[in-house]
Amino acid sequence: MLVAAPREETRSLRAFAPALLLLVVCLIINYIDRGNLSVAAPLLKDELHLSPSQLGILFSAFFVTYTVMQFVVGWLVDRFDVNLILSAGFVLWSLATIVTGVVWGFALLLLMRLILGIGEAVALPSCSKILARHLPEQYRGFASGAIMSGLRCGNAIGTLGAGLLMAHIGWRPVFIGVGIVSLLWLPAWLKWMPRGGSDVSAESGLSPTAIEILRQRSFWGTCAGAFFE
């Protein structure tokens, strides 16, 4: 029995590999879409005659809904099908990206940024829930690292790739094209998303309370690292 367990865990990690790859791609797309506006800012400012303060509002609006929705999404993924929540959020932020490429005026751009924040808020809580449900604890560090590499790649690809495209064809086609191409991720996810599984900590009654989490030095270290990043 002691020899068989690692082989079983290895098989489960291999079986999870397609889903993990899709989660990495999901985070790449997530960070490309959220950063596109900053890359397009000089073009937007000239075409729509936006003031610096209006640009600042557009940049920050995303994080208003994104931050608030983290709490809502955390509640949702603990109670409903996390695969479908991730899918719904993905569709919402992809559509927001597409529509951003066709709207005119500050008000509609602001609305799209707020909607984008709502949709993109599902990504990280959903990924964390999926890893906890489908991977043994010793493999979650590797999987989390892969997902975090995806968001860093998204920043780089979005800044360089989208920037070059915008310089050649304009910002509107890039928003529309990226949003449409991103939707190709959805049928792949619906085919290979992990099914079944169970949250080990929830089953064993070991789910920590908020107070217990706040007492952990590792929690505050993680928060400090993210804050100063």
Image (cartoon, rainbow, N blue to C red):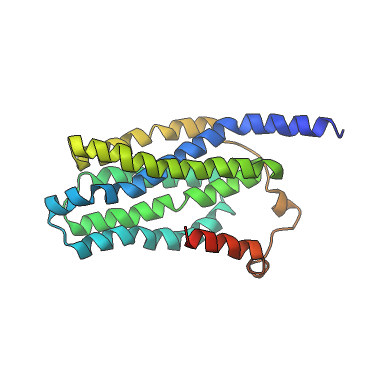
Q: How far across and down, in percent of the image, does residue 146 sit?
A: 55, 40
Residue 81 appears in the figure: no
Q: How far across and down, in percent of the image, does residue 221 sit?
A: 59, 62
Which of 23 and 142 lies nearest the eye of the viewer?
Answer: 142
Q: Residue furthest right?
A: 1
Q: How many discs appear?
A: 0
Vertical position of residue 110 compared to residue 95: above or below: below
Instruction: Using the rendered view, name the quadrant where residue 181 is placed.
Output: top left
- What residue is at 57 percent from the left and 49 percent from the top? 128
Tell me if 102 is positioned left or right of 90 in this view: left
- What residue is at 20 percent from the left and 44 percent from the top? 102
Vertical position of residue 125 compared to residue 195: above or below: below
Which of 209 and 82 lies nearest the eye of the viewer?
Answer: 209
Tell me if 3 is positioned left or right of 10 in this view: right
Q: How far across and down, in percent of the image, does residue 189 sit?
A: 49, 34
Tell me if 46 is positioned left or right of 41 in this view: left
- What residue is at 34 percent from the left and 48 percent from the top? 35
- What residue is at 38 percent from the left and 63 percent from the top? 64
Instruction: Using the rendered view, name the quadrant where residue 3 is placed.
Output: top right
Residue 137 appears in the figure: yes
Q: How far across and down, in percent of the image, does residue 223 sit?
A: 54, 62
